[in-house]
Image (cartoon, coloured by chain):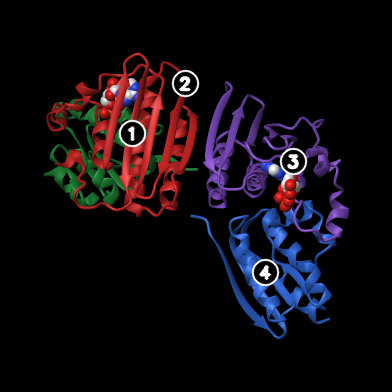
Chain colours: A red, B purple, C blue, D green
Amino acid sequence: MNKEKYQLKIPSKTDNLELIRTFVSRISEMVGFTDDDVYKIELAVDEACANVIKHAYKKEEEINLVIELDYKKLTIIISDQGIGFDVNKILNRDIKNYLAQMKVGGLGIHLIHALMDEVEFRSEPGRKTEVKMVKYFVKDGKIKKSSES
Amino acid sequence: MNKEKYQLKIPSKTDNLELIRTFVSRISEMVGFTDDDVYKIELAVDEACANVIKHAYKKEEEINLVIELDYKKLTIIISDQGIGFDVNKILNRDIKNYLAQMKVGGLGIHLIHALMDEVEFRSEPGRKTEVKMVKYFVKDGKIKKSSES
Amino acid sequence: MESFEVSKRVEGKINILYIKGYLDAHTAPMLEDEIQGLVDNGEFQILVNFKDLLYISSAGLGVFMGFIENIRSNGGDIKLSNMNSKIFRVFDLLGFPTLYDILEEEQEALTKFNS
Amino acid sequence: MESFEVSKRVEGKINILYIKGYLDAHTAPMLEDEIQGLVDNGEFQILVNFKDLLYISSAGLGVFMGFIENIRSNGGDIKLSNMNSKIFRVFDLLGFPTLYDILEEEQEALTKFNS
Ligand SMILES: Nc1ncnc2c1ncn2[C@@H]1O[C@H](COP(=O)(O)OP(=O)(O)O)[C@@H](O)[C@H]1O
Ligand SMILES: Nc1ncnc2c1ncn2[C@@H]1O[C@H](COP(=O)(O)OP(=O)(O)O)[C@@H](O)[C@H]1O
């Protein structure tokens, strides 16, 4: 397979989460991921898009979703032109303690890390946010999910 | 409903027709078209995209699909940067005679006209093709499918 | 995911093809190969049963267009049966009913072949 | 299209919610409203049966997080039962099993409430 690109631009509203999941899971199935991996990819994308809808914009704007396929992996980039956030602050949170305090929210980003093989958040507060996540077709044993270590 | 825009860019290969149909039919369902209209929209889009795949490019390139929703209609624009064609030559074909001569092909554009409320082809030979098709949420009786008259 | 399948049954001199699922520009070559196989074997009496077909685009109709002249000039025919109403409408919109025998039931089509 | 439904059954002091379909950021408010209604009526013994739930995202888990403190401080609890393995994994990944009673069967959960 050569490098292939699929792009979806879609209004940022929760009504569209289903369509986004369908889109992503069809492509993931098509390229041969197991049902289990399809589910993980679908959920990770749902979380990232739900964040754009909830946090990025004051009103309905646009979610930009790009899927790139090469011979060894599926890469998904979800971006918005919204308010952004301090990535380090969120990522350094200890999820166990956080949960034990029964705080509402804060689960999505943790989940994305747990579900995908590689995850990278970039955000410029006030300007934009971009999440890049990767799932390999074959895990070579050495590649370990960073959030599970 | 305000004006809303959905955009899909996808490699031009027949494997993707199913995904395109799913995408378009989900949006059509979501905005409340009857099953019957959803089917017509899906088929018209399939035909236009199959044409891009078959005719526009020498190798796999990109199909660009835009769906716009306003309060009274769904508009779909399918475009490519391919070889283009002489629109008038195709559109003036008499489909009955054509069929009776048992020619292969030439059915897609006719079908698109029969299925949608408004259809417009623009092509610049050697550069690009764009098909715009419209389905109204409510047909006001006066709007008649041009190809059925 | 959506899919397309062809299966075959022989009834006397007539070859019946059962088509199932989604017939579009991606899957049409499968049907084309199947009919080509029959033609190559000199089998020109072909009945296509659409009972389990859920979707068809013009690429599917094109398959029949591609063979009909040759098959008829060999004294055979392609007849079509058991279309659901959505599928039939596509054939109808394109004027196929004047060019092809499209029957409600497989049995009617078989009878018509033998008459 | 995908959908989400909640239905309710009362068993003694325990309110059982049956959730069905797809629970995401779009449908989570439906579940939230349902639980809010119970809390407003002073019903703090809540069992959520996941038997027919096909999908959950963190927005769904967030609903439970949003109520649990208040409900426990009123002597009640939210217990969860009958999750399929895909759904359970999401709870598990987020460490919920240490914070919530997640039971295989509805009956076990009912017993646990009454003990
Ligand atoms: N696309 C985004 N734009 C702006 N802020 C974001 C975005 N994605 C995440 N965030 C910030 O990161 C925080 C944590 O996100 P998450 O872990 O998904 O939990 P939750 O959405 O429940 O708060 C959010 O509360 C928000 O402040
Ligand atoms: N996107 C396109 N790019 C180039 N040529 C096109 C395109 N769409 C249609 N055509 C031309 O119009 C003709 C008629 O198309 P159509 O009615 O769909 O029938 P068919 O695809 O079976 O030939 C095609 O054969 C092709 O020459």
Decide if residue A106 is on the left or right side of residue D32.
left
Distance CA(mark 1)–CA(mark 2): 22 Å
Q: Is mark 3 within 8 Å of ligand 2?
A: yes
Residue A60 shows which numbered tag? 2
Marks 1/4 in contact by CB < 8 Å: the verdict is no
In this view, the mark in front (1 or 4) = 1
Estimate the spatial distance between the alpha carbons at disc 1 and disc 3, rounded to whole Å.
Answer: 40 Å
Residue density around tag 3, few if under 14, some if 14–19, many if 20 or more, within 10 Å: some
Nearer to us in this view, B119 or C101: B119
Tag 1 secondary structure: strand
Q: Which residue is mark 3?
A: B85
Residue closest to the eye, D43 or A104: A104
Give the image location of residue B136, x and y in percent.
70, 32
Do the residues bearing badges 3 and 2 touch, measured as CB atoms within 8 Å? Answer: no
The answer to whether one can see residue D7 in this image is no
Asked whether residue D69 appears in the rendered view, the answer is: yes
- Label 1 or label 3, whichever lies nearer to me, is 3
Residue carrying label 4: C49
Residue placed under numbered mark 1 in the picture: A132
Q: Are marks 3 and 4 in contact (CB under 8 Å)?
A: no
